Image (cartoon, helix red, strand yellow):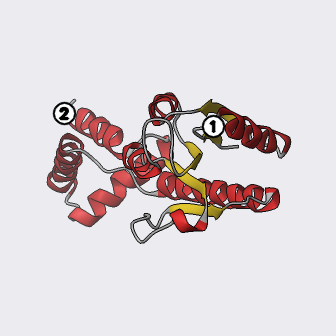
Amino acid sequence: MANVIVAFSKPEDARNIRNILTRSGFSVAAVCNSGAQVLAQAGNLSSGLVVCGYRLADMLYRELYDNLPPEFAMLMVSSPSRRDTQTPEDVVCLPMPLKIHDLVSTLEMMEQTQARRRRRQKQQPKKRNEQERRLIDQAKKLLMERNGMSEEEAHRYIQKCSMDSGTNLAETAQMVISLIHI
């Protein structure tokens, strides 16, 4: 369940939205009246959703959006006239008066989108730093010189050893280097 931060300039509106979300099964991490409070709360959380109005006590939604970490999605609740061409594409807008069903289903959709994005990021291979690349290249060169392997065969050998031992490629390359130098 995503962390939800509710932010409206009127405390009563914020509490009402929080109560609706809590009854609907959402985890409301904080209720705020200013953008600074939202940013402070967002800094304490790894990701989440921000439900806010067009105007907060100290800033407009756009300034808040520009300063939010990228792991946060924003749902702005305002009158349709407040939405303009300057509204970023990834800010979801709901019109006032607000229907509870629309709010809940929109937040569920945003939560699913965030979960998919996190899964995709986890599945992407980790970028190797320069030191790890040099280590792997050094291990491949040693295998090519000592065992007469091609670069592709040496890479496959390190990959297979890595998978068999359950270690990452750089650690396996380090083990190959240390075993050859013994």
Which residue is the extreme one toward the right? Answer: 23
* Residue pointed to by mark 1: 10
* Eye-nearest disc, 1 or 2: 1
Label 2 residue SS: loop
In terms of image quadrants, where is residue 19? top right
Vertical order, 92 against 71 (above or below)? below
Which residue does the image show at 51% across and 66% down from the upper left? 83
In front of the other: 78 or 18 = 78
In front of the other: 46 or 38 = 38
Which residue is the extreme one toward the bottom? Answer: 85
Query: In the rendered view, does 99 fall on the left or right side of 6?
Result: right
Query: In the rendered view, does 103 fall on the left or right side of 137?
Result: right
Query: In the rendered view, does 76 fall on the left or right side of 100?
Result: left
In front of the other: 14 or 165 = 14
Q: Amino acid at mark 1?
A: Lys
Give percent across and percent down for residue 143.
22, 51
Q: Is the residue under label 2 in contact with that under label 1 (CB below 8 Å)?
A: no
Which residue does the image show at 19% across and 33% down from the upper left? 181
Q: Amino acid at mark 2?
A: His
Which residue does the image show at 39% across and 66% down from the upper left? 86
Quadrant of the image containing the N terminus = top right
Which residue does the image show at 53% across and 41% down from the upper left? 47
Give percent across and percent down for residue 59.
42, 41
Check residue 181 in the rendering and tell me which mark sits there, or answer none: 2
Check residue 109 in the rendering and tell me which mark sits there, or answer none: none
Quadrant of the image containing the C terminus = top left
Give percent across and percent down for residue 157.
35, 55
